[in-house]
Amino acid sequence: MAIENFLESKNIRLDQQLHFTAEIDKMTSILRRTMLIDGSRRENDAEHSWHIAVMALIFAEYTVEPVDIARAVKMCVVHDLIEIYAGDTFAYDVAGNQYKAERESASADKLFAQLPKEQGTEIRLLWEEFDAMQTPDAKYAACMDRLQPFLHNTLTEGHTWVESGTCRSSVEKRMAIIKDFMPEVYKWVEKNIDNAIEKGWLKA
Amino acid sequence: MAIENFLESKNIRLDQQLHFTAEIDKMTSILRRTMLIDGSRRENDAEHSWHIAVMALIFAEYTVEPVDIARAVKMCVVHDLIEIYAGDTFAYDVAGNQYKAERESASADKLFAQLPKEQGTEIRLLWEEFDAMQTPDAKYAACMDRLQPFLHNTLTEGHTWVESGTCRSSVEKRMAIIKDFMPEVYKWVEKNIDNAIEKGWLKA
């Protein structure tokens, strides 16, 4: 079973691409802290990446600068690939985030080297652009990456906030990109932060 | 818990879009017949959609006509949304496929009406284009949609083929779009069909 039994095509590029395709299936077993909205279990990186990619088709009208939706969708589907070797780092885990950049960079080296060079470079650049959060497309993708778990939290009684004892200022910091780049959406975020405090899901 | 507790923004469009975002999280509980490559469980529609979207970034060099990768990626992320109400229909289930079109069209009516009109129409058109498999972008997305479970089957000892007693001609019919549109990739597919017959995973 599994990749050891892969039957080669003898086209080296194609074999690399098929191997890579099999390798990234591991995203389905990288669990995030976020619960699915039905509360049944934690979501995984593949599900999360898909979810924010669809969101990117929908929310572009609220950005303060124009964005290229198709590029943002591409970023969304690849933005967490490096977690295949680096693991998911919970947004509100201070210790875990300290060496996150080094861990993720090493993971990117290992992962993208498995593709034909120019393709590995192209996807790595998309991830780096996302991660740097400087371009409009990256800011928009980052907003989706933050809005999605926020929505899940509001619909699962603040699940990850409660579990981790998160406070208001941490969430506000995490949501700052939405405040700056999608202020109309942030009004809704803020209302939900107030509600979460009131309900005791978030510490004041 | 869940959507009943959704806190409205008072911006009707935004509320619709956030509701839709929550609704499509149901893709995570629509199970396909395909096993994950690690053999641990069946994959779901969200995972599958994500997986083929990333694949669409990688395999475009093999198409017989040029494709717009970004459009294909968009199609990949939305192509199974209608299964939220229609359910997944196994590719090799003859009876299930008889009324598939009606079921999926009714599901599309219900689902896309939940978005602001022009957005619902835009995503529905992407799905319809995918489903009709006439344009190069749709053909390419369809190839990814067929190559991914095929790869999974080859790496999980023909799991869904064995389980359903599938025969060679059914798989060849399903893979015909790859034969036509990505002949270089089909060489590898054909080799694996031969291997599956030899191993007893597929009926001759």
Image (tube, coloured by chain):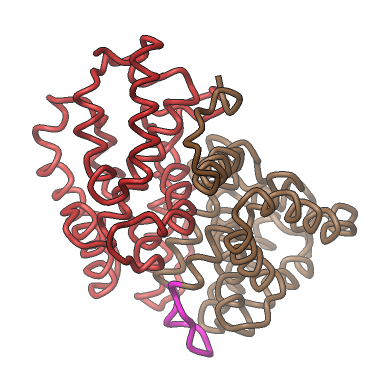
Chain colours: A red, B brown
Which residue is more in the foreground, B50 or A140? A140
| Number of on-image labels | 0
- Up-down relation of residue B67 to residue B151 (above or below): below
Which residue is more in the foreground, A78 or A56? A56
Q: Is residue A115 left or right of residue A14?
A: left
x and y percent of residue A187 in the render? 35, 37
Q: Quadrant of the C terminus of chain A?
A: top left
What residue appears at the point 20 percent right and 26 percent down from the top-left corner? Answer: A170
In which quadrant of the rendered view does residue A14 lie? bottom left
In which quadrant of the rendered view does residue B154 lie? bottom right
What residue appears at the point 54 percent right and 62 percent down from the top-left corner? Answer: B76
- Up-down relation of residue B111 to residue A20 (above or below): above
Q: Is residue A162 visible?
A: no
x and y percent of residue B123 in the render? 60, 63
What residue appears at the point 40 percent right and 44 percent down from the top-left corner? Answer: A26
Q: Is residue B175 visible?
A: yes
Residue A47 part of the magenta segment: no
What residue appears at the point 55 percent right and 51 percent down from the top-left corner? Answer: B48
Q: Can you name the residue that lies furthest to the bottom here? A: B65
x and y percent of residue B96 in the render? 85, 52
Q: Is residue B204 left or right of residue A176?
A: right
Which residue is more in the foreground, B56 or A133? A133
Q: Is residue B126 left or right of residue A32?
A: right
Which residue is more in the foreground, A62 or B132? A62
In which quadrant of the rendered view does residue B102 lie? bottom right
- Up-down relation of residue A83 to residue A98 (above or below): below
Q: Can you name the residue that lies furthest to the front here? A: B10
Residue span colored magenta: B59-70
Q: Can you name the residue that lies furthest to the top here? A: A200
x and y percent of residue B198 in the render? 66, 62
